[in-house]
Amino acid sequence: MRLIIISGRSGSGKSTALNQLEDEGYYCIDNLPASLLPSLVEKTSGHEFKLFQGTAVCIDARNAWQDLANFRDIVGSLPDTVERQVLFLDAQEVILIQRFGETRRRHPLSTENIPLAEAIERERELLAPISSSADLTLDTSQMTLYELRDTIKQRLLGTTAGKMSVLVQSFGFKRGVPADADLVFDVRMLPNPHWVKELRLKTGLDPAVQAFLREQPMTQELYDDISGYLDRWLPRYREGNRSYMTIALGCTGGQHRSVYLADRLYQHYRETLPGIHIRHRELE
């Protein structure tokens, strides 16, 4: 039996993730009391639930605080036959505040005496036992609804037991380092195509930009160092039962250098790592 537990702060995209899993054939329940997980697993392990791909539940700050505090013990009490994954969604606080302002919905922890910003911070504290137990954490600050749905399909549903899902992501430092990155490589020391007039409006996927960067001796040296590190240590991560790995490469704007190197790494590993994906954050 496969059980996916979705959690995260309000406004981070939990409903979107749960809806996507329902579309993929999962039996889904929103706002399940964490203490009922063992009973739910026992029930959905029955023959009548075999038509579903698995069970997905959303557990968030609306739970009793005692259950949230005991989350790790509750999950640990589940039978070993249950293939469980915990997905934690989050976003920058300024983004969460903005989303609540756009939807005009009330935060579940806010009251007349607790303003929105304080409720969001309180929610982070309540959900700490879940976030620290998560197999996969996604920062949805820069994701559209469609990008989140695609990410759920690729990274959560595209990974089978015993396999490691690897995301190679390019980004721009001017918009911040991805919060869910496991390894971050700074490639800003490379010559910047932005300062070449003919290349400024192109990207690292354009042949002209790729040719420019290949001509720089430093580019190959940096690529060899990064790929050499990954060649040596990615298998060790996998041997440690790591299910998800995000490798982020950043330049100033996330348009040229990081895109080029991220794409080279993706092409290098796509044959040997079937669970590899690529995302160019700033190009999206």
Image (cartoon, rainbow, N blue to C red):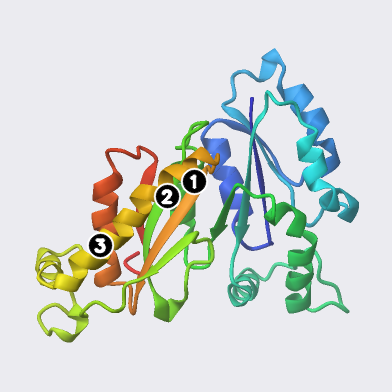
**C-alpha separation, residue under disc 1 versus residue under disc 3:** 20 Å
Residue type at tag 2: Trp
Where is mark 1, residue-wise? 237
Sequence order check: which comes first, mark 1 or mark 3?
3
Q: Residue at x 78, y 45 (%)?
A: 72
Provide the residue designation for mark 3. 223
Q: How far apart are marks 2 and 1 (CA)?
A: 6 Å
Instruction: Point out the image quarter for the C terminus.
Output: bottom left
User: Residue 103: percent from the left, percent from the top?
Assistant: 63, 68
Apparent side of residue 122 relative to residue 172 in the rendered image (left or right): right
Any part of residue 131 in sight: yes
Of the pair 189 and 145, the residue shown nearer to us: 189
Residue marked by disc 2: 233
21 on left or right of 68: left
3D distance between C-alphas at marks 2 and 3: 15 Å
* Quadrant the N terminus occupies: top right
